[in-house]
Amino acid sequence: MPEGEADRMLVSRIEEGTVVDHIPDWRANTVSRVLRLDKLARMQADVSVVILQNVASRHLGRKDIIKIDRWHVDEKDADILCLVFPTITVNYIDEGKVSKYEPQVPDTIEGRIRCPELNCISNTEREPVTPRFSTLKKESLLQCRYCDALLAFASVPEYVRT
Amino acid sequence: MSPGTDFLGRDVVSARDFKRDQFEQILQGVEDFEKHHGSLEGAQRGKLAALLFFEPSTRTYSSFQIAAEKLGMRVSGFAGPTGSSITKGETLHDTLRMFEGYGADVFVIRHSKMGAARFAAEISDTPVISAGDGSREHPTQAMVDLYAIKKAFGHIDGLKVGMLGDLRYGRTSSSLAYALSNFDVDITFIAPEALQMRPEVIQLLKQRGSTPKKESALKSVAKDLDVLYVTRIQKERIPDPTEYERVKGMYEVNLEALRDAKPSLKVLHPLPRVDELSTDIDETNYAQYFVQAAGGLPLRMVLLNLILGGVS
């Protein structure tokens, strides 16, 4: 079945919300975790999330898609997602009109990921400290501002703060 | 630029943050100070040093305390969590705020959490000097170590430096490695794999063009070294007790282990030692660790003075 047909058949178009496309096949659950969609769904009663897996794709062969009805994914979260899945694309839909957002590898990340080093000050509950990372793009690593610990882009989903 | 400009009001939270000329400025300052002993007495009279040691310390606390007092400063704070409000659960953040309110001119902080010094520097306008944060760094010890090396050889460039022991959790080793990365030195990390140097340290060294070597035993490299920096392997760091028993002998430095070493080799140790460094080295030309320890006080006097606006 050609690209686009499968998801159109399975789920109707959304008028308002976000479509995260070109997710590597069977990795939609990881994307869901990075975007903290379970939390969103709990907070926003009228948000619906549809996950399509193993859909035919011209570029990737097979891919996953996530459609979020009535919620715009934060661009900063989309940027974090692109550390792990550089192929993803994000489409925002407003009143049926689609605008593309191209996620960028950010220079710094604040507050969204916790440090892998348990003894880092940023993992101390009672101190008012926000975890901060800088990106070492060439090496595909994040570096904690406080303890200098390194975190591979691929390991980011394990450390997303919930 | 006056000698103190680079340091005026600055934080000392990581040896990563300092460049070669800044290390050289400090070392020159200590050398000058030692030549004109006593010239800094009372130089910062009336200022207040807050020594906030959230982790117990005797040596580093005392050297900062004496350094501040010799500069004429008043000293306040605590030498460990016992008897302080830390045991009641007061945070680093609140403690800093409180001492800022008391008019502290400089903070010297030791804390068990990695990165505590950087966090402290971020939330406070008062200069922060790290006296060790978790197993991350101990930047002023690295300055002391550089000074001991410079004193022994007259230079740092061109030397072959071996760092031995618990490099993964040893905060002095990582700070010294960062500091040495500003110089043209050949570094070898000698440790069992589980205690090898942390990836972020190796990463920065490579970024700066240094290619440190890794070895698992002293024996294979002892003959090539100019400096051997020894740290203790702590039993609790190695999960398997039989593994500890197996490796501990490999990292004990004694005359037998240095049989093939150059006569000019200098052995450094941040002290205190337990059994990783034999006393049979003490009376040999290899021993540089007591000279190294003696450098702690003048170095901290010079550093405090520069940060607080004195000249070297």
Image: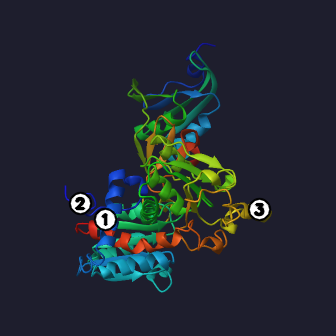
Are the residues flagged by discs 1 and 2 in contact, CB closer than 8 Å? Answer: yes
Chain of residue at mark 2: B
Q: What residue type is labelled 1?
A: Gly
Q: What residue type is labelled 2?
A: Pro
Image point 50% across, 64% down: which residue? A124
Image point 55% across, 20% down: which residue? A8
Image x and y of residue B24, in percent:
34, 56
Q: According to the image, label 2 marks what residue?
A: B3
Left or right of residue B204: residue B32: left
Q: Please, what secondary structure does the residue beneath circle 1 have?
A: helix
User: Label 2 neighbourhood size at 10 Å, few (<14), some (14-19), many (20+)?
Assistant: some
A42 lies above or below B128: above
Q: Please, what secondary structure does the residue beneath circle 2 have?
A: loop
A85 lies above or below B43: above
Image x and y of residue B21, in percent:
32, 52
A74 lies above or below B46: above
Q: According to the image, label 3 marks what residue?
A: B240
Are the residues flagged by discs 1 and 3 in contact, CB closer than 8 Å? Answer: no
Left or right of residue A54: residue B93: left
